[in-house]
Amino acid sequence: AIRNRGIVRFHLDKLDESYKDLLYASQLDPKDENAHYYLGKLLHKQKNYPVAIQFFDNAIGVVNTRPDFYIDRGTCKIDMADFKGARSDFFKSMQYSSDRGYAYYQLARCYAAEADKENTFAFLREAKKQGLFSDTRYFSYIAKDAYFTGWAKDKDFIALIQELKFGRK
């Protein structure tokens, strides 16, 4: 009950109250993977990345087959500029889920941060194949994403976006 209240408070953006509930729940039951996971999400949201990683690690230590645990830990690692670790988490998440579009998108972000155009484009195309870009709002995310904004005037990148958006090269 306390963990669930903490999760609800997290979604209501009542982070201080959520943190207290989730921490207490994790202390009452150290094997409550959801308490650890949401503590990781909360601390990531607050940009406390090293501690967030510890809570994601705790959650994975309890249940290591949940793809969302790896996706969120990988996203946190991107924010820490640990692109190699992030890539490892995204690939690991794909072992446990057939819904890979978001993982491919995050992999593209990692490669974009390292100015690896070939892999960035390959993973954006894979995300498209998985149906991620069927929701056109992702194109506005790409346009605003700090990892891609440096390529806003790159003719190859513009062509790729057109390909992803409209299905033509």
Image (cartoon, helix red, strand yellow):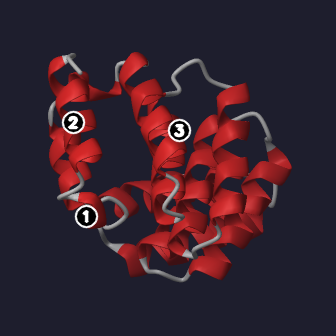
Q: Which residue is mark 3?
A: 103
Tag in front: 1 or 2: 2
Estimate the spatial distance between the alpha carbons at disc 1 and disc 3, rounded to whole Å.
Answer: 20 Å
Q: Where is residue 8 shown, x and y percent of the image?
A: 38, 55
Tag in front: 2 or 3: 2
Question: Which residue is more in the foreground, 153 or 125?
Answer: 153
Q: Residue at x 57, y 76 (%)?
A: 80
The amino acid beneath tag 3 is Ala
Q: Which residue is mark 2?
A: 159
Question: Which residue is more in the foreground, 83 or 50?
Answer: 83
Question: Which residue is more in the foreground, 112 or 153?
Answer: 153
Q: Residue at x 80, y 41 (%)?
A: 64
Q: Is residue 12 above or below residue 70?
A: below
The amino acid beneath tag 1 is Thr
Label 1 crowding class (10 Å Cα cut-off): few <14, some 14-19, many 20+?
A: few
The amino acid beneath tag 2 is Ala
Label 3 crowding class (10 Å Cα cut-off): few <14, some 14-19, many 20+?
A: many
Q: Which residue is mark 1?
A: 149
